[in-house]
Image: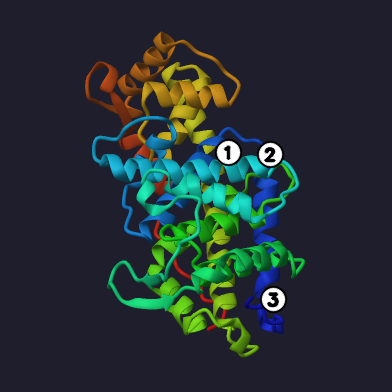
Amino acid sequence: MYVAPELTSEEQDVRAEIQKWNDALTFQVRQRNRWTAPLRRMTFARNVQGSNSIEGINASVDDVAAIAAGEKPATVDEETERALAGYQLAMTYVLQLSQDPVVVDPTLIRSLHYMVNSYDLTKRPGRYREGPVYVMQESTGDIVHEGADAAALPGLMDRLAATIMNNGDPLIDAAMAHLNFVLIHPFKDGNGRMARVLQSLVMVDDNDISPVFFSTEEYLGRHTRAYYDVLAEVGRGEWAPETARPDQVRPWMRFILTAHLNQAMERGARIVSAGNASAALSKLLDDAGIDDRALDALFDALFGATVTRGRYISSLREAGTEISPQTATRDLTALAQSGLLVASGERRGRAYTAAEKLIDLRREVGLGRAWNHVNPFD
């Protein structure tokens, strides 16, 4: 296996900064504010959208959120919908595993691969490939890497699983699991998505904080070219860890540290913005004479999601509140009549999005603002 280099003092400083941001995120999420669940839903959707966009499986964040809620977006074809649903299923299973100590073994990895790729049985979901495989950059078609020999895959995957927890730091262990998996490339298809699922799996722990907030998939989706470039630089075109120089992996480690730092800072900023918006949204509901439960719908719209009756009922159920379809319809109609949401469509197809008041508030608190990338190694 490729081995993580010992971190330099500069890299240790960045790792400490990431931990500081993650500790702050953990504290904020533990407060169980009304915006935590809507923010988690949209963060999960951004993660899924980002990871799949790297492989050319494209949909909007809102469409991904709709699929997660069991709806069928009109703008997404059936194969894309099934691919996204499979990835969401695998990641949801990872989130469930986070509630207990996790043991990563080849059987679990193959099961997750089946979830990710079961929408197309020609991709041999859950089964190692039988021949060679080449990694191609989706945007250019360039071949950047050849996977390990097919005959060696069972042994290599056993070895990978046995060495995942070598470093004692979940972030470093997850980064190395990601790198070794993607360079081995054990499956016919879906290796990139599985490497990112595996990274999340290794990072989960037995605690009450959703690992959704600590994923780098959104960042990787926005920096796909740099992601492929660093994998090509470290892998050097083939699986050959036995000839790797001690510092060969360092560019990957710095890339992942940069990804975690930017992702943590960006999500920290979103949490602050959500907190700042909370009092304003409550006042808008109070002024309109609408029940406070409708805050869930406003937060979803504020974060950029489309609100439907089904998604509104589901979000309240997640928060421990049960309402009837008739009550949900009355709430959403009242929000539209008060100028907080804009309705479109008819009857069962009716959907609601943020009205001008919410768009102004989104701008005022800084939600949706483009993130200024930080390179801590400049």
> Which marked residue is nearer to the observer: mark 3 or mark 2?
3
Left or right: residue 172 compared with residue 338 = right
Question: Where is residue 32, by image quadrant?
Answer: top right
The foreground one among 357 and 174 is: 174
The residue that disc 3 covers is 13
Q: In the structure shown, which secondary structural element does the residue marked by tag 1 occupy?
A: helix
The numbered mark, 1 or 3, whose residue comes first in the sequence reads: 3
Q: In the structure shown, which secondary structural element does the residue marked by tag 2 occupy?
A: loop
The residue that disc 1 covers is 36
Residue 189 at what x, y percent from top left?
Answer: 41, 59
The residue that disc 2 covers is 31
Left or right: residue 327 compared with residue 167 = left
The foreground one among 56 and 12 is: 56
Residue 23 at what x, y percent from top left?
Answer: 70, 55
Q: In the structure shown, which secondary structural element does the residue marked by tag 3 occupy?
A: helix
Q: Quadrant of the N terminus?
A: bottom right
* Residue type at the position of mark 3: Asp
Spatial CA span between label 1 and label 3: 29 Å
Spatial CA span between label 2 and label 1: 8 Å
The foreground one among 199 and 270 is: 199
